Amino acid sequence: MGEPSAAGIRIRLFAGLQEQAGWAERQWTADALVEATLTPRQLWQTLQLPGELNSVRVAINQQFAAADTPLLPGDELAFLPPISGG
Amino acid sequence: MSWLSYLRSAVADAEGLQLKIDLHLEAFEPLACLEQWQRQLAASGPSTNASAAESVFIGRVRAAAADGTPLLALELEHYPGMTERQLQQLATGCCARHGVGSCLVQHRIGRVLPGEAIVLVAIGADRRGPAQRCCQELLEALKHDAPFWKREWRRDGTGEWLTSNTPL
């Protein structure tokens, strides 16, 4: 984790997941992206987010995506707890 | 009319679909929205105003929480940007599959009181089948695939995020 960077990855949490984790948004620095392919699943584990990844949905750049989708610098990643609209 | 439109995205696609989607930060009156929508359709030409079949769904907040205790309010959080995009994609896809001519979606965000409208879906088509099927499919889609989250606030001051929708 570090200062916000346009080349980093913006990570966002919502609703109950945000409250359980204790934060709403973080920036994954570009330096950390030098390493091999990074995926939402790896970030979920690295950030030690609460609960099981299969209980949430992943969105990359505001589109639903698979948890093993490679992330790119500048991406916006969101972990979405169970949806309850309408 | 005392509602505030948070987002306005009225578009007509290449096949002539009339589509309007709004998120409301404050209480909206669904019948007033419908009346305004009808006027807008009428102003856009006789072909779009001539839906022989219309299907309308209005959803309101219950007076009781999921556990049966009195509900003080429902809080609706959303993912700004993605919610609007998803609603647009879900509506255009559903309308195309059913071949309907017009679609109105109004959805609340923020703090919603018991009895207040939370969602309005109105579909216009040439026949009742497509209108009703599209209305139901779109409603289910936005309940499960548009990033909204509900939190129930009880009168004792406690709140709890809902992790599922009510049964169909």
Image (cartoon, rainbow, N blue to C red):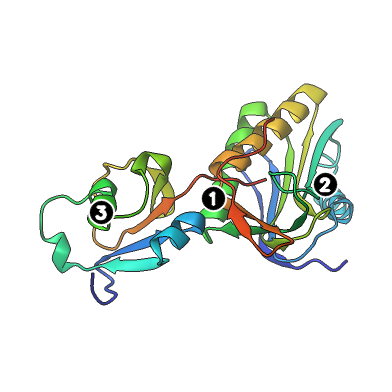
State the SS at label 3: helix
Q: Which mark is residue A43?
A: 3
Q: Name the residue nearer the viewer: B25 or B81.
A: B25
Q: Position of residue B63 (x, y in %)?
A: 81, 50
Q: Residue at x 55, y 44 (%)?
A: B163
Find disc 2 in the rendering and name its residue: B45
Any part of residue B92 in sight: no
Q: Earlier in the sequence, mark 2 or mark 1?
A: 2
Horizontal side of B156 relative to B88 (left or right) equals right
| Dots 3 and 2 on the same chain | no
For mark 1, name the chain. B
Camera-side mark, 2 or 1: 1
Residue lying at the far left in this picture: please name it. Answer: A35
Is A26 positioned to the left or the right of B118 in the image? Answer: left
Q: Element type at marker 2?
A: loop
Q: Residue furthest front?
A: B156
Residue kind at label 1, given as amino acid type: Pro
Residue located at (80% from left, 66% from top): B3
| Disc on res. B147 | 1
Image quadrant where residue A52 sits: top left
